[in-house]
Image (spheres, helix red, strand yellow):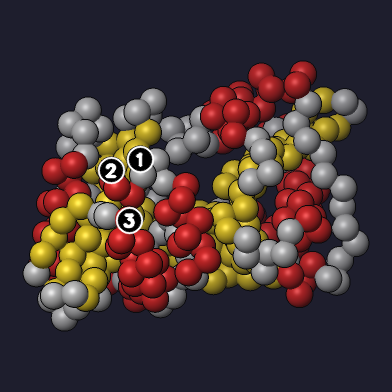
Amino acid sequence: MNIRRYKPSDRDAVIRLAARMNSKGETHIAYFDGSEETMVAYLDGLSPSPEEGFVVAYAGDTLIGCFGLEYDDEQNRTWLHGPVVDSPAWHTIADALYEAALAILPARIDDLELAFDLRHYRGIDFARRHGFEGWKAGSAVLVYTREQFARITPRPCEGLQDAHHAAFMELHDLAFPNTYYTGKQMLDMRDDTYALLAETRDGSFAGSAFVEMQSPETGFIHFLATVPTLRGKGVGKALLEQAVHWVFAHTEAKDLALTVEVGNPTAIRLYERTGFVRERVIRGYRLQR
């Protein structure tokens, strides 16, 4: 077995391996989906680049594993994208990839996170063996398809107004403390790939949704939040309808996904009533090194 840093010549093999393994619950990791199209967009959008943050494992000329890093200096945090392994010696290769990945992770980054489908028993065992602790009961992944969109009345999208930036950032910090994007980062990221949608009530900011086109085929709602005093008044449903419209009315996407904690049945009921269907449950694990 040969483990080394990623090279551009590894790209196609990594895309095929990761897409194949992530299409099955028992080998699924979070952060990218089970299609080659999504993997292409994922690799292109990584920070740092795959050449800086990815390691691969080969048996002869065959790629049998990979492990990626994505980190944010502002939050002093890294998301571990792996281990992705296709071999009977799963644990041995996974441990070796992890060691190689940590060797290229800057020492200043000491907050590590990874996540697996609850059916990925080897991944969950890997996290526990290396001292990670489960920090959520689990997050349900729900998906809305283009077929469902064809049956609804389109809803115009409302972008976040400049006057509401401060209110948006305050709500984001309240609803999603210490998460992977800050409110300021999302304001700066808005373009054809990322949309920051908003709802107002009587001219005041009422809630927001941050949506990404992760690939030409797949959209993802990263964050959706309603001002606490306006919960139960249709703001969340309106934001979902905006997100659905933004993804399906302007692109050729096949589906739109989101995640929600399994301990939040109110939100799950809202998503399911809007047409989202549960696909899997993911659990995250964290380690302070």
For the residue carrying disc 1, how many other residues have a C-alpha within 10 Å: few (<14), some (14-19), or many (20+)? some
The reply, left or right, for residue 278 in relation to residue 178 is right
For the residue carrying disc 2, how many other residues have a C-alpha within 10 Å: few (<14), some (14-19), or many (20+)? some
The quadrant of the picture occupied by the C terminus is top left
Give the image location of residue 121, x and y in percent: 27, 72
- Determine the secondary structure under disc 2: helix
Mark 3 is on which residue type? Pro
**Separation of disc 3 and disc 1 at Cα?**
14 Å
| Residue 8 image label | 3
**Separation of disc 3 and disc 2 at Cα?**
11 Å
Identify residue for label 1.
Answer: 48
**Across the whole image, how many numbered discs are drawn on residues?**
3
Give the image location of residue 188, x and y in percent: 60, 28
Please indicate, yes or no, whether residue 285 appears anywhere in the rendered image.
no
Q: Image quadrant of residue 209?
A: top right
Near-viewer residue (240 or 52): 52
What residue lies at 87% left-to-right and 26% top-to-bottom? 203
For the residue carrying disc 3, how many other residues have a C-alpha within 10 Å: few (<14), some (14-19), or many (20+)? few
Identify residue for label 2.
Answer: 52
The reply, left or right, for residue 129 in relation to residue 189 is left
Q: Are marks 3 and 1 in contact (CB under 8 Å)?
A: no
The reply, left or right, for residue 159 in relation to residue 114 is right
